[in-house]
Protein backbone atom coordinates (compact mmCIF):
# COMPACT_ATOMS: atom_id res chain seq x y z
CA UNK A 1 0.00 0.00 0.00
CA UNK A 2 1.18 3.53 -0.77
CA UNK A 3 0.90 5.41 2.52
CA UNK A 4 1.53 9.07 3.29
CA UNK A 5 1.99 10.28 6.85
CA UNK A 6 1.02 13.95 7.22
CA UNK A 7 2.87 15.19 10.26
CA UNK A 8 6.06 13.25 11.00
CA UNK A 9 6.49 14.11 14.64
CA UNK A 10 6.88 11.39 17.25
CA UNK A 11 3.61 9.58 16.48
CA UNK A 12 3.77 10.04 12.72
CA UNK A 13 7.36 8.84 12.60
CA UNK A 14 6.60 5.83 14.81
CA UNK A 15 3.71 4.74 12.60
CA UNK A 16 5.63 5.50 9.42
CA UNK A 17 8.67 3.56 10.58
CA UNK A 18 6.68 0.50 11.64
CA UNK A 19 4.65 0.52 8.43
CA UNK A 20 7.79 0.80 6.28
CA UNK A 21 9.43 -1.96 8.31
CA UNK A 22 6.45 -4.22 7.52
CA UNK A 23 6.89 -3.68 3.79
CA UNK A 24 4.63 -0.74 2.96
CA UNK A 25 5.66 2.15 0.72
CA UNK A 26 5.73 5.11 3.13
CA UNK A 27 6.19 8.84 2.61
CA UNK A 28 6.66 11.14 5.59
CA UNK A 29 5.56 14.75 5.13
CA UNK A 30 6.70 17.42 7.58
CA UNK A 31 8.16 20.92 7.73
CA UNK A 32 11.00 19.98 10.11
CA UNK A 33 13.85 20.04 7.59
CA UNK A 34 16.45 18.83 10.09
CA UNK A 35 14.37 15.74 10.90
CA UNK A 36 13.63 15.03 7.23
CA UNK A 37 17.26 15.36 6.17
CA UNK A 38 18.41 13.06 8.96
CA UNK A 39 15.88 10.41 7.86
CA UNK A 40 17.04 10.67 4.25
CA UNK A 41 20.68 10.46 5.28
CA UNK A 42 20.66 7.71 7.90
CA UNK A 43 17.16 6.24 8.10
CA UNK A 44 14.77 6.48 11.02
CA UNK A 45 15.98 5.19 14.37
CA UNK A 46 13.21 3.41 16.29
CA UNK A 47 13.67 2.45 19.92
CA UNK A 48 10.89 0.15 21.10
CA UNK A 49 10.56 -2.48 23.79
CA UNK A 50 11.56 -5.16 21.28
CA UNK A 51 14.75 -3.58 19.93
CA UNK A 52 16.68 -0.51 18.78
CA UNK A 53 17.14 -0.31 15.00
CA UNK A 54 17.22 1.94 11.96
CA UNK A 55 14.50 1.75 9.34
CA UNK A 56 15.46 2.65 5.80
CA UNK A 57 13.49 3.07 2.60
CA UNK A 58 11.32 5.92 3.84
CA UNK A 59 10.52 8.83 1.56
CA UNK A 60 10.81 12.01 3.63
CA UNK A 61 9.99 15.43 2.22
CA UNK A 62 8.13 18.67 2.76
CA UNK A 63 4.39 18.74 1.93
CA UNK A 64 4.86 20.82 -1.21
CA UNK A 65 7.24 18.15 -2.55
CA UNK A 66 4.74 15.28 -2.24
CA UNK A 67 4.25 13.30 -5.41
CA UNK A 68 1.66 10.78 -6.56
CA UNK A 69 -1.60 9.85 -4.87
CA UNK A 70 -1.52 7.60 -1.81
CA UNK A 71 -3.96 4.82 -1.03
CA UNK A 72 -3.92 5.91 2.61
CA UNK A 73 -3.25 9.32 4.14
CA UNK A 74 -2.63 9.13 7.88
CA UNK A 75 -3.11 12.52 9.53
CA UNK A 76 -0.96 13.20 12.59
CA UNK A 77 -0.66 16.99 12.45
CA UNK A 78 -1.61 18.99 15.53
CA UNK A 79 -5.34 19.72 15.34
CA UNK A 80 -4.83 23.46 14.99
CA UNK A 81 -2.75 22.87 11.84
CA UNK A 82 -5.09 20.48 10.04
CA UNK A 83 -6.73 22.95 7.66
CA UNK A 84 -3.47 24.55 6.54
CA UNK A 85 -1.76 21.17 6.18
CA UNK A 86 -4.52 19.67 4.05
CA UNK A 87 -4.75 22.74 1.84
CA UNK A 88 -1.03 22.39 1.23
CA UNK A 89 -1.37 18.84 -0.13
CA UNK A 90 -4.75 19.14 -1.87
CA UNK A 91 -3.24 17.90 -5.15
CA UNK A 92 -1.78 14.85 -3.39
CA UNK A 93 -5.19 13.48 -2.39
CA UNK A 94 -7.13 11.49 -4.99
CA UNK A 95 -10.68 10.17 -4.99
CA UNK A 96 -9.40 6.71 -4.06
CA UNK A 97 -7.35 8.00 -1.09
CA UNK A 98 -8.60 6.95 2.34
CA UNK A 99 -7.89 9.66 4.92
CA UNK A 100 -7.52 8.44 8.51
CA UNK A 101 -7.23 10.81 11.46
CA UNK A 102 -5.64 9.50 14.64
CA UNK A 103 -5.21 13.00 16.03
CA UNK A 104 -5.88 14.01 19.59
CA UNK A 105 -9.04 15.83 20.60
CA UNK A 106 -12.40 16.54 19.02
CA UNK A 107 -13.37 18.25 15.76
CA UNK A 108 -10.83 16.44 13.58
CA UNK A 109 -13.41 14.64 11.43
CA UNK A 110 -15.16 17.93 10.72
CA UNK A 111 -11.83 19.45 9.67
CA UNK A 112 -11.09 16.60 7.25
CA UNK A 113 -14.54 16.84 5.69
CA UNK A 114 -13.82 20.43 4.73
CA UNK A 115 -11.17 19.08 2.34
CA UNK A 116 -12.21 15.57 1.26
CA UNK A 117 -15.47 13.71 0.72
CA UNK A 118 -16.87 12.29 3.95
CA UNK A 119 -16.96 8.77 2.48
CA UNK A 120 -13.15 8.88 2.21
CA UNK A 121 -12.71 9.67 5.91
CA UNK A 122 -11.89 7.23 8.69
CA UNK A 123 -11.80 8.28 12.33
CA UNK A 124 -9.91 6.68 15.14
CA UNK A 125 -7.69 6.92 18.16
CA UNK A 126 -4.45 5.38 19.32
CA UNK A 127 -2.88 4.85 22.71
CA UNK A 128 0.65 4.20 21.46
CA UNK A 129 3.22 6.33 23.35
CA UNK A 130 5.99 8.04 21.39
CA UNK A 131 8.69 10.62 22.10
CA UNK A 132 11.11 12.41 19.81
CA UNK A 133 14.62 11.73 21.07
CA UNK A 134 16.24 13.85 18.35
CA UNK A 135 16.23 14.21 14.56
CA UNK A 136 15.31 10.87 12.94
CA UNK A 137 15.11 9.25 16.39
CA UNK A 138 11.87 8.10 18.05
CA UNK A 139 11.34 6.20 21.30
CA UNK A 140 8.22 4.19 22.12
CA UNK A 141 8.09 2.14 25.30
CA UNK A 142 4.93 0.34 26.37
CA UNK A 143 2.03 -1.10 24.38
CA UNK A 144 -0.79 0.68 22.58
CA UNK A 145 -3.76 0.02 20.33
CA UNK A 146 -5.52 1.62 17.38
CA UNK A 147 -9.32 1.73 17.14
CA UNK A 148 -10.89 3.00 13.93
CA UNK A 149 -14.01 3.04 11.74
CA UNK A 150 -15.25 4.71 8.58
CA UNK A 151 -16.82 8.06 9.46
CA UNK A 152 -20.22 6.94 8.16
CA UNK A 153 -20.02 3.73 10.21
CA UNK A 154 -19.94 1.41 7.18
CA UNK A 155 -17.62 -1.58 7.10
CA UNK A 156 -16.37 -1.07 3.57
CA UNK A 157 -13.51 -3.21 2.21
CA UNK A 158 -11.05 -0.31 2.14
CA UNK A 159 -11.50 0.17 5.89
CA UNK A 160 -10.74 -3.50 6.48
CA UNK A 161 -7.63 -3.19 4.29
CA UNK A 162 -6.38 -0.24 6.34
CA UNK A 163 -6.89 -2.19 9.55
CA UNK A 164 -5.05 -5.20 8.13
CA UNK A 165 -2.06 -3.08 7.10
CA UNK A 166 -1.79 -1.42 10.52
CA UNK A 167 -2.24 -4.75 12.27
CA UNK A 168 0.52 -6.32 10.15
CA UNK A 169 2.84 -3.52 11.27
CA UNK A 170 2.31 -4.56 14.89
CA UNK A 171 0.10 -1.58 15.72
CA UNK A 172 -2.70 -3.73 17.23
CA UNK A 173 -5.47 -2.21 15.13
CA UNK A 174 -9.14 -3.18 15.00
CA UNK A 175 -12.37 -1.89 13.53
CA UNK A 176 -14.52 -0.62 16.39
CA UNK A 177 -18.18 0.30 15.99
CA UNK A 178 -17.89 2.08 19.33
CA UNK A 179 -14.98 4.19 18.12
CA UNK A 180 -16.57 7.44 19.35
CA UNK A 181 -16.58 5.96 22.83
CA UNK A 182 -12.87 5.22 22.47
CA UNK A 183 -12.21 8.73 21.13
CA UNK A 184 -14.05 10.42 24.00
CA UNK A 185 -12.37 8.22 26.59
CA UNK A 186 -9.00 9.22 25.18
CA UNK A 187 -10.09 12.88 25.27
CA UNK A 188 -10.83 12.38 28.98
CA UNK A 189 -7.38 10.81 29.44
CA UNK A 190 -5.64 13.63 27.53
CA UNK A 191 -7.64 16.43 29.14
CA UNK A 192 -6.41 15.14 32.48
CA UNK A 193 -2.80 14.11 31.87
CA UNK A 194 -1.73 16.38 29.00
CA UNK A 195 -3.05 19.58 30.50
CA UNK A 196 -1.84 18.78 34.04
CA UNK A 197 1.65 17.92 32.81
CA UNK A 198 1.75 21.00 30.58
CA UNK A 199 0.80 23.35 33.41
CA UNK A 200 2.96 21.77 36.11
CA UNK A 201 5.98 20.71 34.08
CA UNK A 202 5.64 17.16 35.47
CA UNK A 203 6.30 14.02 33.52
CA UNK A 204 3.38 11.59 33.63
CA UNK A 205 4.92 9.65 36.52
CA UNK A 206 5.58 12.77 38.57
CA UNK A 207 1.86 13.52 38.80
CA UNK A 208 1.63 11.19 41.77
CA UNK A 209 4.29 13.09 43.72
CA UNK A 210 1.39 14.55 45.75
CA UNK A 211 -2.16 13.24 46.18
CA UNK A 212 -3.52 16.37 44.51
CA UNK A 213 -2.19 15.17 41.14
CA UNK A 214 -4.24 11.98 40.80
CA UNK A 215 -7.22 13.71 42.44
CA UNK A 216 -7.21 16.47 39.84
CA UNK A 217 -6.83 13.94 37.04
CA UNK A 218 -9.81 12.00 38.36
CA UNK A 219 -11.97 15.12 38.59
CA UNK A 220 -11.20 16.07 34.98
CA UNK A 221 -11.92 12.56 33.69
CA UNK A 222 -15.31 12.54 35.41
CA UNK A 223 -16.20 15.95 33.93
CA UNK A 224 -15.27 14.93 30.38
CA UNK A 225 -17.14 11.65 30.60
CA UNK A 226 -20.24 13.51 31.81
CA UNK A 227 -20.09 15.72 28.70
CA UNK A 228 -19.65 12.67 26.45
CA UNK A 229 -22.63 10.93 28.01
CA UNK A 230 -24.74 14.06 27.57
CA UNK A 231 -23.87 13.88 23.85
CA UNK A 232 -25.13 10.30 23.69
CA UNK A 233 -21.70 8.64 23.74
CA UNK A 234 -21.42 5.67 26.09
CA UNK A 235 -18.07 6.67 27.56
CA UNK A 236 -17.06 4.78 30.68
CA UNK A 237 -15.27 6.76 33.39
CA UNK A 238 -13.53 3.78 34.93
CA UNK A 239 -11.79 2.84 31.67
CA UNK A 240 -10.30 6.33 31.40
CA UNK A 241 -9.38 6.32 35.09
CA UNK A 242 -7.67 2.95 34.64
CA UNK A 243 -5.75 4.33 31.64
CA UNK A 244 -4.63 7.32 33.71
CA UNK A 245 -3.48 5.08 36.56
CA UNK A 246 -1.63 2.78 34.14
CA UNK A 247 0.14 5.70 32.46
CA UNK A 248 1.24 7.18 35.78
CA UNK A 249 2.58 3.78 36.87
CA UNK A 250 4.18 2.61 33.61
CA UNK A 251 4.92 5.69 31.45
CA UNK A 252 6.63 7.57 34.25
CA UNK A 253 9.26 9.41 32.20
CA UNK A 254 6.92 10.26 29.33
CA UNK A 255 6.46 13.94 28.49
CA UNK A 256 3.07 14.37 26.79
CA UNK A 257 3.14 16.32 23.54
CA UNK A 258 1.39 19.24 25.21
CA UNK A 259 4.22 19.56 27.73
CA UNK A 260 6.77 19.26 24.93
CA UNK A 261 5.01 22.12 23.12
CA UNK A 262 5.04 24.30 26.25
CA UNK A 263 8.75 23.66 26.81
CA UNK A 264 9.45 24.59 23.18
CA UNK A 265 7.27 27.71 23.33
CA UNK A 266 4.83 26.36 20.74
CA UNK A 267 1.02 26.59 20.70
CA UNK A 268 -0.61 23.50 22.19
CA UNK A 269 -3.62 21.34 21.29
CA UNK A 270 -5.51 22.55 24.36
CA UNK A 271 -8.26 24.00 22.14
CA UNK A 272 -9.07 20.64 20.54
CA UNK A 273 -9.04 18.85 23.89
CA UNK A 274 -10.10 20.89 26.93
CA UNK A 275 -11.42 23.69 24.72
CA UNK A 276 -13.80 21.45 22.78
CA UNK A 277 -14.98 19.79 26.00
CA UNK A 278 -15.71 23.17 27.60
CA UNK A 279 -17.59 24.40 24.51
CA UNK A 280 -19.74 21.28 24.37
CA UNK A 281 -20.30 21.35 28.12
CA UNK A 282 -21.63 24.89 27.89
CA UNK A 283 -24.05 23.89 25.16
CA UNK A 284 -25.24 20.99 27.32
CA UNK A 285 -25.47 23.09 30.48
CA UNK A 286 -22.85 21.02 32.32
CA UNK A 287 -20.31 22.53 34.71
CA UNK A 288 -16.71 21.43 34.10
CA UNK A 289 -14.72 23.69 36.46
CA UNK A 290 -11.51 21.67 36.60
CA UNK A 291 -11.33 21.16 32.83
CA UNK A 292 -12.05 24.85 32.23
CA UNK A 293 -9.43 25.99 34.77
CA UNK A 294 -6.74 23.95 33.02
CA UNK A 295 -7.88 25.42 29.68
CA UNK A 296 -7.51 28.96 31.01
CA UNK A 297 -4.12 28.24 32.56
CA UNK A 298 -2.80 26.80 29.28
CA UNK A 299 -4.13 29.79 27.37
CA UNK A 300 -2.15 31.99 29.75
CA UNK A 301 0.97 29.87 29.27
CA UNK A 302 0.58 30.14 25.48
CA UNK A 303 0.07 33.90 25.65
CA UNK A 304 3.19 34.31 27.76
CA UNK A 305 5.23 32.25 25.27
CA UNK A 306 3.91 34.43 22.43
CA UNK A 307 5.09 37.55 24.24
CA UNK A 308 1.73 38.65 25.60
CA UNK A 309 1.92 41.16 28.40
CA UNK A 310 5.58 42.02 27.77
CA UNK A 311 6.60 45.65 28.05
Image (cartoon, rainbow, N blue to C red):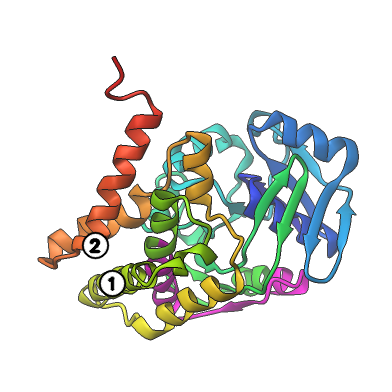
Q: Secondary structure at mark 1?
A: helix
- Of residue 174 and residue 295, the one placed in the foreground of this image is 295
Q: Residue furthest top?
A: 311
Q: Residue at x 66, y 74 (%)?
A: 143
Q: Residue at x 10, y 66 (%)?
A: 285
Q: Secondary structure at mark 2?
A: helix
Most prominent secondary structure in the magenta stretch?
Answer: helix
Q: Is residue 201 visible?
A: yes
Q: Which residue is mark 1?
A: 219
Q: Is residue 113 visible?
A: no
- Of residue 245 and residue 132, the one placed in the foreground of this image is 245
Q: Which residue is mark 2?
A: 290
Residue 235, percent from left and from top: 34, 80
Q: Quadrant of residue 136?
A: top right
Q: Is residue 178 magenta?
A: yes
How dense is the environment of label 2, judged by Cα within 10 Å: few (below 14), some, or many (20 and up)?
Answer: many
Badge 2 or badge 1: first in the primary sequence: 1
Q: Are marks 2 and 1 in contact (CB under 8 Å)?
A: yes
Q: Quadrant where the C terminus lies?
A: top left
Residue 276, percent from left and from top: 29, 55
- 123 versus 197 height, above or below: below
Q: Which residues are magenta?
A: 164-190
Q: Residue at x 48, y 61 (%)?
A: 119
Q: Does residue 206 appear left or right of residue 307 in this picture?
A: right
Q: Quadrant where the N terminus lies?
A: bottom right
Amino acid sequence: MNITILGAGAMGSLFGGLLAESGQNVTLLDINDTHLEAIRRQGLRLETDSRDRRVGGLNACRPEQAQGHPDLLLVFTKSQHTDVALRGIAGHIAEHTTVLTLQNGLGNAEALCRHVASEQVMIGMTTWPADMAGPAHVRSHGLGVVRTLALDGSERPTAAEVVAVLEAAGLRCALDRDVWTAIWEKVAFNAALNSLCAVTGCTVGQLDAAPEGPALARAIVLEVVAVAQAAGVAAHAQRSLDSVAYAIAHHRTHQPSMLQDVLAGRPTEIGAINGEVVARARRAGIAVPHTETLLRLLRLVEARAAGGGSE
